[in-house]
Amino acid sequence: MSSQPILRIEDLRTYFHSRVKQAFVRSVDGVDLEVAQGETLGVVGESGSGKSVTMLSAMGLVSAQPGIVTGRVVFDDGTPRELLEGLGRHVALERRDGRIMGVEKDERGWRAQAERNLTGVRGRRIAMIFQNPKAAMNPFETIGRQIAETVRLHTGVKTAHEARERAIHWLGEVRIDSPRLRYDNHPHGLSGGMCQRAMIAMALAAEPRLLIADEPTTGLDATIQARIVDLLAELRERLGMTMVLISHDIGVIVRLSDRVAVMYGGRVMESGPAAEVLTEGGGGHPYTQALLASIPQERNLREKGRLPAIEGEVLDTINVPRGCRFRERCQRIHDSVRARCEEHEPELAEVSPGRRVRCWLYQA
Amino acid sequence: MTTRYSQAQERVSEYSQLSAWSTARRADRWRVLYGAAVAVLVLVSYALGALHWLPRDPEAMDLQAMLLGPIEQGYLLGTDFMGRDILTRLILGIQAYFLPGLLSIAIALTLGALLGVLAGYRGGRAEMGVTYLSNLVDSMPRLVLMLLVIAAFKPGIYTIMAVVGLTTAPTVATLVKGKVLMLKARNFIESAVALGVPPRAIVFRHILWYNCRTLLLIQATLGMAEAVLIETSLSYLGFGVQEPTPSWGNMVQAGANYLLQGNLWVSSAPALAILATVLGFHLLGDGLNNMFEGGQRR
C-alpha cells in the first residue's frame, strides 16, 4: 500500500444558508481527509455529522441553491486536479460586523465552473454509489443498457456490441447470476440487493480510480447487507480498488476499512488505522468510544445489562458552541480539562503514528 | 450456492404474482392494440395517398341518385346532394385532417417538450417564462386567434394547424415541466450526474426519451383528436378545406341545408365519422395511458 494520496481534502467547508432562520447551517466545517492509493477509508458518524455532504461537496454535487463550498479538494492520479478551483469567484458574501449575514450566489457560473473542474473526473475517475439503489437507477431503462452507457461514456469502448459485452462482464463481476438474461431486466424487476449490485457494476464499468460508496448497505435487508459487504470486500481485493466508504454502520466500516475517520458536527474527531480506532477501550476519542459502546453486541449487553446510547442530541450546526463540539454529550469530561473543553476547540493532533484525535484528554 | 437458490426463489415469486386473470386481460389488450394498429395503418395509407383504391370516383355526380340513404342503389353509405358517393368522400376526407394534424402534433410536441424540459430542468426564469407564456396563450380564445391568422394570411389548413400546434405547445410544456420536476427530485438523476453522464444526455436520454415518451405519445393521440375537431369546425364555417375537395367538416355543412327536408343522413354520415374518430383517438390515448402509466404503478 503506497502512501501517495489519491484524494486530499483540506479545510473543506460546506455551509447552507437558511433564509428562514437567517443563518448558516454548517454541515461541513473544516474537514481534512486523505485517501491513499489502494486503501479503503471508512467515514463514520451519526446522521447529520456531515459524512455524505463532505463527499457530495467534493464531487460538486451539492445542489441546494445557497450552498457554499470552500477549501481544497485535490484529486491526483498522476496529474493533480483541484476540484473546487475558482468556485469562490461566483459567491459574494454579505458581511456585517465580521459575521456573514447573507450570500449571493451566481448559480449558473458556479455550476459551469464546477462542471469544468469535474469533467473527466466525475464518473470516470471517481465513481459514486448511493443508498437506495432502486431510486438511483432510471426505472424505464434496462439495467444492462444503463451499465453499457457508462462503458461508452468513460472507456475506449464505443461500439454498441462491445459495450454490451462489457456490461455483461461487469454484471458477472458483481456476482449477478445469468448476467446475459439480467441485462434486459428493468430495475423494478430486481430485488434491492440485486439493484445495488447492478449499481456497483454501473460505477465500476467506468473503471474508476476511486469509488465513493455512500451508505451502500442502508435500506437493504440485514442478510443482503452482509452480501453487499462481502461483494465490496471481494472486489476490493480482486481489483485493488481505492474506496471511500461512508456509513453509520460501524460493523460495515470495520469489515471493509483500512483507515477510518470519525465525524461529528461537521468535523473529523478522530482518524487512524481502523483496527486501532475502532477498538473498544483502546483509548481514543470519547465520541468514538461512545459509538462503539452503542453497537448491539453480546458483550455489551451482558456486561451493561442494557444498550448504552449516546446521551443528548446531534449537534445543532447552526449555533456551534464555543469549545469542543462534543463537550455537552461527553462522558469523560472531568474537572482537569473542563475549562479548556469549554473555551477552545482542540486540534486534530497526532497521538501515535498515523492516528489523530481531536480531544483535550490527549493533548498536554 | 445459497445465493443462487434465494435468487431463484425471488424470481419464482415474481412471476407467480401474475394471475391467470391479469394475463388474460393482457392478451385482450394486445388484441385491441393489434386491431387499432391495422385500422391506423389503413387510415395512414389513405391519408398519405399510398392507397389509391376508392369505391367510386369522388367527383362523379349521379343526378339520378341524389340524397340517397345507406345501401340504396348500391351506394354503401348513400349519396350527397349532387349524387356523389359519401363513402368515397369520407375516405378522401381523411386526407383533409391527417397530415395537417400531424404537423400540429409535431409542432406542439417538439416545442412543448423543449420548453417543458427547459422550465423544469433549469428552473428560475425559464420556468417563470414558460408559465407566463402558457397563461397568455390560455387566455386567448383559440378560434379567434385562428380566424385572425386566416385573415392575415390565407385560409390554408396547414397555416391553421401550425397555429393549433403553437397554441397547444404550452399545454404540453406544462405537463412535461411537471414530470421533469418530479423526476428531478428522484435520485437517479443525481446518480446519473455522479456517474458523469453529461447534462445533454440526462435531459434528452434519461428524462425525455425514457421518462416522457409515453406522456408525449398520449398527448399525440389527443392532439390528433383535437386536430380533427378544429379542421372540421373550420371547414364547417367555410374557412378550412374548400369544396370540391372533400372534408368531413364541409360535408356536414353541405348536408345541413337538406336537414329540414328530412334528409338526415347526408349530414349525419360525416358527423358520425367525426364522432367515431375523435372518440377513437381519445380511447387510444386512454388505453396507452393505462398500459404504460398503469403498468408502472402496479
Image: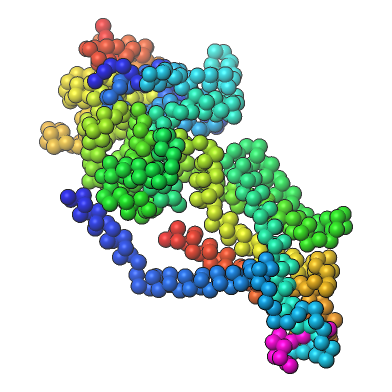
Decide whether the magenta segment is chiefly helix, strand or loop.
loop
Magenta stretch encompasses residue B80:
yes
Image point 70% across, 49% down: which residue? B134
Position of residue B272 in the picture relative to residue A130 (left or right): right
* Whole-percent x, y for residue B52 in the image: 68, 73
In the rendered image, the vertical position of residue B37 relative to residue B199, given as above or below: below
Q: Residue furthest bottom?
A: B73
Quadrant where the N terminus of chain A sits is top left
Q: Residue furthest top?
A: A364
Image point 31% across, 60% down: which residue? B14
Magenta stretch encompasses residue B250:
no
Which of the 4 image quarters holds residue B120? top right
* Whole-percent x, y for residue A225 in the image: 26, 42
Range drawn in magenta: B71-82
How is colour applied across the structure in the image? rainbow
In the rendered image, the vertical position of residue A288 relative to residue B254, given as above or below: above
Image point 43% across, 45% down: which residue? A160
* Whole-percent x, y for residue A364 in the image: 26, 6
